[in-house]
Amino acid sequence: MLDVPSPTVVGQEVELTCSFDLNGDTLYSVKWYKDDVEFYRFVPNDWPPGQFLPLSGVRVDLSKSKEQSVYIRTVALETAGVYKCEVSTEAPVFDTVSAKKEMNVYVLPTEGPKITGRHMKYRVGDTVTVNCTSAKSKPAASLAWYINDKKVGADYETVYSTILHDDGLEVSCLSLRFLITSDHFTNGNMRLKCEASIPRVRYTMSDEALVISEQLQHVSGLQIRENLSKVRDTAAIVATPVRWIHRLLSLLSLVYSLLFVRI
């Protein structure tokens, strides 16, 4: 039985297992191939019995590899491929059996997705058009939009073609477009979230944006202006008697001076 872990993640160490029963025959060799190119063999009568044949993308840990397993260190994108285990017995049978399995290698994003194109404020009746772009990975992450933690239907989303970079990594893009109604705002706020996931390796990251109702901002500003006007009016009323008292004191001082001069 052949066991090849898939998918694996770049940087991991993986064990490939080839379990077999010789039914009393003598083992001659176990050979491992990637895309039909041999990279490891175990021959009990050789020394050392385990031997590595250099191959791009495959780094074998000879200290851990045995007759029924081979350890690959520091998985890279080039490690992906079809692996074959071939088991041969000694004379007089000279029987050979083999099995193949594919290994897929994933590269996880180093950061979450990014939301672009939004405004800070919207009002009921406005159309929201925003984009979500994943970080580079392999395969490209699956994207999904949420409005106030509720997943958006496909009618509001537009999927763009996956972008392939020179390093073999991929980027996915998903736009969201919808008409704002009063139901979208809770206490004057609306939350937009874009979630990126790679299900087979349980990877999930997200980006969130908080949108504020423009109507609520206008009401708040009006209340502030009205309150400031009231304060100014109150200050003017309080200041009026004070001005009259100052004028009266000045007049009394003038009269006193005139009387004093005549005497």
Image (cartoon, rainbow, N blue to C red):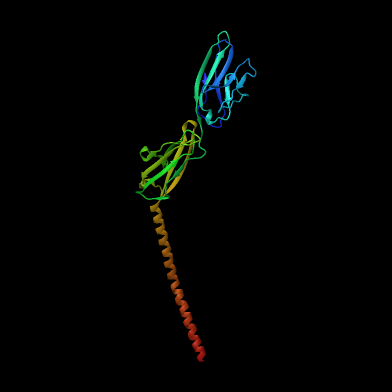
x, y (%) of residue 151?
A: 40, 39
Is 141 placed above or below 49 here?
A: below
Report x, y in % for residue 156: 37, 40
Residue at 39% across / 52% down in the picture?
214
Q: Nearer the viewer, residue 9 or 170?
A: 170
The image position of residue 109, as x and y in percent, is: 50, 37
- Which residue is rendered at x = 52% and y = 17% of the image? 98
Q: Position of residue 88 (x, y in %)?
A: 56, 14
67 left or right, relative to 202: right
Quadrant housing residue 18: top right
Residue at the farthest right position = 47
Nearest the eye: 206 or 74: 74
Question: In the image as oriented, which residue stretches furthest toward the top?
Answer: 92
Q: Residue at x 39, y 42 (%)?
A: 176
Q: 35 or 42: which is nearer to us?
A: 35
**Residue at (43% x, 39% y) in the render:** 173
Q: How many marks?
A: 0
> From this viewpoint, which residue is outermost toward the bottom?
263
Classify 41 as above or below 73.
Answer: above
